[in-house]
Image (spheres, grey):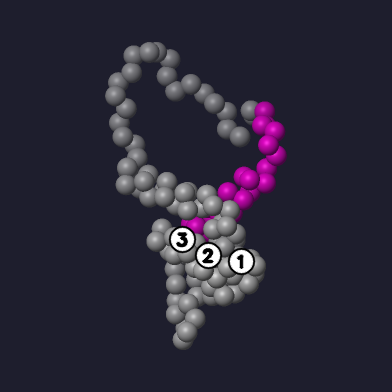
Amino acid sequence: MTELTPQCETDDHAPAARSFDPVACDRAAAIFRALGDPNRLHILILLRQGPMCVTAIADELDDNLSAVSQRLKLLRSERIVVTRREGKHVFYALTDDCIVELIDHALAHGSESLTPKPPR
């Protein structure tokens, strides 16, 4: 946990310069919304192991094929997963290592104790 330090010492504030890209911020928020559903997150955890087809994902999660397909459609629309067709099968995979790291960090943070740690 990082230590909180005040950013200013007066009430006289100049307008803050925009230090972020609003489009990138909107995109990141959409990714977090997509990751915010436990069922979609379960799919992504499976895909961390490698590409899988919809049927294999549904079987692994003991879930309805149609529901899994809808979840994958949303994840694909947010560019969190990509597809590759082999004959009749469509395989899904995580887009890149950034998505893998985001999932790993979220899971690590989620498994930490809920008791706040004292500042260093």
Q: Secondary structure at mark 3?
A: helix
Relative image position of residue 80 (x, y in whole percent) = 45, 60
Q: Residues within 10 Å of mark 2 (few under 14, many from 20)?
A: few
Q: Amino acid at mark 3?
A: Leu
Find disc 3 in the rendering and name its residue. 75
Closer to the camera in the image, 19 or 103 = 103
Mark 1, secondary structure of its residue? loop
- Please tell me which residue is depicted at 47% across the width and 53% down the height of the picture: 34
Identify which amino acid the numbered label 2 is placed on. Answer: Ala
The answer to whether residue 88 of the structure is visible from this angle is yes
Q: Amino acid at mark 1?
A: Asp
Residue 79 is left or right of residue 66, and the answer is left
Residue 2: percent from the left, percent from the top? 57, 32
Write the residue at 44% across / 60% down.
Answer: 74
User: Residue at coordinates 49% horizontally, 81% vertically from top-left?
Assistant: 89
Q: Is residue 36 above or below residue 11?
A: below
Residue 113 left/right relative to 44: right
| Circle nearer the N terminus (2, 3) | 2
Q: Which image quadrant for residue 84?
A: bottom left
* Residue position marked by numbered label 1 in the rendering: 63
Tell me the tag on residue 67: 2
